[in-house]
Image: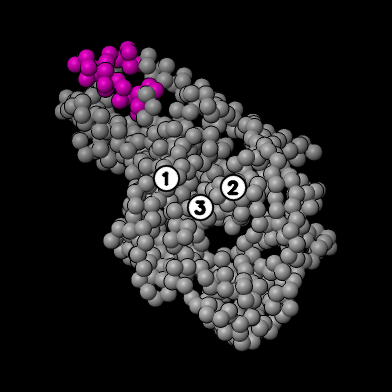
């Protein structure tokens, strides 16, 4: 199947490229003698009125052979002399040559558009999480629904992101629906620099962010004290509440809202509890299973005179902690690797982290799925911002304060290209899954898909151009250049993953092919355009001898580049090749 995917992958891209040359040559009246996909012996040949359509054995390129003068001027009939490529005006020849790479750059827009047409639903414009220390902190709260930004209505969370992305440093009026009441606040997005992967290309994007995510934490609870009503009722840290008095709850916000309405009456909580099963499946792995349970909870009565505060929309969570002893499991430790520096410092599963280096902690880390990079206002972000120093961690265990010092672990490895990497990691984890999100329909699917298609194509072009520049600058190794073996793997992997992945990979490769063909190397389209530029400057065509010499030089450069790419491919796959040879010889 990989071979079939590869042939389909390459053939489509070559057809698109050569069809650009063919279509505009025909449009301008140039006689096309041969239109071929592939080189070498012809597997298929169809004769048209004046053009021969061929399918070659080797699917590594193609060509459009037009009627040209060159050395065979006497072989051209006088009545067809106006149909030669050379007889066309300069601008027509430029368009014919440029049409191939242009098609490779337009084609991805169609491919990306087809992919984004599947985006029929978006996350709603709700606030599920507010990141500490960010512009929205203290102004927006979980459960808020954003209805407008600067007077412009928003219908989805992507609309919200787009509105704030272009407003870095500018105070923006935000209208929200909070508990059924319209509220307006002013938030000033901060400018954030996001690194586009891979990081060695040093590509950055500067966008405005206010520090919110649309997905809600599940109602997974943490209990900091053993004398709380929740603990006495049999609840434990990491229990996931599923219902209150038979009423289903799906988010921590819902749980807080329901329990805050309680006046001290007994409530029945249904929950599921993760229970560890070490050395499961015959000792292959450690797993956890969810056990169900029911707890009867009697929250403490609300203090005399205590009421909801409009100036503190987060009062429900505080009220629940004060009266029932329940809070979010956000800062509770779920797993500590044995032997790690955190383990040696005394940290254990179930502990609640309160401070890092003297700073109170409210969030473990930013969820990258929410569209945000690692943030140093979270605990993990702070740790990785200063990985080379000793950190002091403070936590509580059953209400008792404890502390310890440790340093983040450093990992080193080499990738398949032989490039060396180092990074710091914090392997201790928490457990706070996200609730399933409801969605809203995409109001303009076609317009959205076309815009995203154009944007993705532009980003791919930027990515590839910067990659070329970084290689020339020596910032990225020449070993990053790939050849047909890598393309074979890419096509096979993408095809195995499904149509969407196949289309996505084809779009990126098409952009790559189009830009490579624009390089000013004779033989490539960019080389022809360079000769046309010289013709325009000199006011006369470049001599046939000069064109032949340039073609020879260009072919030499192209062969050299292909050898480098092939050598890189073989180097990456050397271990696999050796194993396959051994299998064949034994």
- Give the CA distance from mark 3 to mark 2: 12 Å
Which corner quadrant of the image does residue 148 belong to?
Answer: bottom left
What secondary structure characterizes most of the magenta part? helix
Query: Quick one: 210 or 487, which is closer to the camera?
Result: 210
Rendered residue at 62%/76% (across/down): 323
Picture layout, residue 289 above or below residue 467: below
The spot of residue 90 in percent (x, y) is 21, 26
Rendered residue at 37%/47% (across/down): 168
Please report whichever mark, 3 or 2, sits nearer to the chain's N-terminal start. 3
Please report whichever mark, 1 or 2, sits nearer to the chain's N-terminal start. 1
Query: Mark 1 = which residue?
Result: 191
Please report whichever mark, 3 or 1, sits nearer to the chain's N-terminal start. 3
Query: Mark 2 = which residue?
Result: 381
Secondary structure of the residue carrying numbered label 3: loop
Q: Is residue 542 magenta?
A: yes
Q: Nearer the viewer, mark 3 or mark 2?
A: 3
């Amino acid at each position: 199947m990989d071979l079939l995917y590869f042939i389909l992958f390459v053939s489509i891209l070559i057809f698109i490229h050569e069809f650009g040359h063919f279509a505009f040559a025909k449009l301008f009246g140039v006689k096309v003698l041969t239109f071929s996909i592939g080189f070498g012996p012809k597997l298929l040949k169809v004769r048209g009125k004046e053009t021969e359509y061929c399918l070659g054995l080797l699917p590594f390129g193609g060509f459009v052979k037009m009627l040209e003068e060159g050395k065979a001027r006497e072989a051209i009939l006088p009545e067809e002399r106006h149909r030669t490529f050379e007889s066309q005006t300069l601008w027509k020849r430029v368009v014919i040559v440029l049409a191939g790479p242009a098609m490779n750059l337009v084609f991805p827009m169609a491919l990306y558009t087809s992919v984004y047409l599947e985006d029929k639903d978006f996350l709603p414009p709700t606030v599920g999480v507010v990141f500490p220390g960010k512009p929205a902190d203290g102004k927006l709260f979980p459960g808020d629904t954003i209805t407008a930004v600067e007077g412009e209505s928003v219908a989805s969370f992507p609309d919200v992101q787009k509105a704030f992305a272009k407003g870095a440093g500018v105070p923006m009026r935000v209208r929200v629906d909070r508990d059924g009441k319209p509220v307006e606040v002013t938030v000033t997005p901060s400018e954030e620099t996001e690194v586009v992967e891979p990081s060695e290309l040093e590509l950055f994007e500067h966008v405005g962010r206010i520090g919110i995510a649309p997905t809600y934490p599940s109602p997974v609870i943490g209990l900091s004290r053993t004398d709380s009503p929740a603990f006495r009722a049999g609840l434990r840290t990491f229990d996931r509440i599923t219902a209150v008095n038979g009423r289903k709850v799906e988010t921590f916000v819902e749980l807080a809202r329901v329990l805050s309405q309680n006046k001290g009456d007994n409530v029945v909580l249904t929950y599921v509890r993760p229970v560890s099963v070490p050395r499961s499946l015959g000792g292959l792995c450690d797993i956890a299973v969810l056990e169900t349970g029911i707890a009867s909870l009697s929250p403490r009565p609300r203090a005399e005179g205590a009421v909801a505060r409009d100036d503190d929309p987060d009062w429900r969570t505080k009220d629940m902690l004060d009266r029932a002893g329940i809070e979010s499991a956000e800062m509770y430790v779920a797993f500590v690797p044995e032997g790690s520096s955190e383990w040696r410092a005394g940290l254990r599963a179930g502990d609640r982290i309160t401070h890092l280096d003297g700073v109170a902690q409210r969030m473990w880390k930013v969820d990258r799925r929410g569209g945000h990079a690692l943030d140093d206002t979270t605990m993990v972000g702070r740790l990785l911002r200063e990985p080379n120093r000793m950190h002091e961690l403070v936590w509580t265990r059953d209400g008792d304060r404890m502390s310890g010092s440790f340093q983040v672990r450093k990992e080193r490895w080499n990738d398949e290209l032989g490039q060396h990497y180092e990074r710091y990691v914090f392997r201790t984890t928490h457990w706070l899954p996200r609730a399933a999100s409801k969605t809203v329909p995409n109001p303009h699917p076609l317009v959205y898909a076309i815009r995203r298609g154009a944007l993705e194509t532009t980003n791919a072009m930027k990515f590839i151009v910067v990659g070329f520049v970084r290689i020339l600058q020596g910032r990225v190794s020449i070993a990053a250049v790939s050849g047909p073996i890598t393309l074979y793997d890419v096509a096979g992997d993408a095809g195995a993953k499904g149509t969407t992945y196949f289309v996505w990979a084809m779009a990126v490769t098409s952009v790559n092919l189009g830009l490579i063909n624009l390089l000013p190397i004779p033989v490539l389209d960019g080389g022809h355009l360079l000769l046309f530029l010289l013709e325009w400057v000199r006011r006369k065509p470049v001599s046939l001898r000069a064109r032949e010499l340039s073609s020879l030089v260009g072919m030499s450069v192209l062969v050299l580049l292909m050898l480098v790419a092939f050598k890189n491919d073989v180097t990456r796959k050397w271990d696999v090749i050796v194993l396959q040879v051994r299998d064949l010889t034994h």
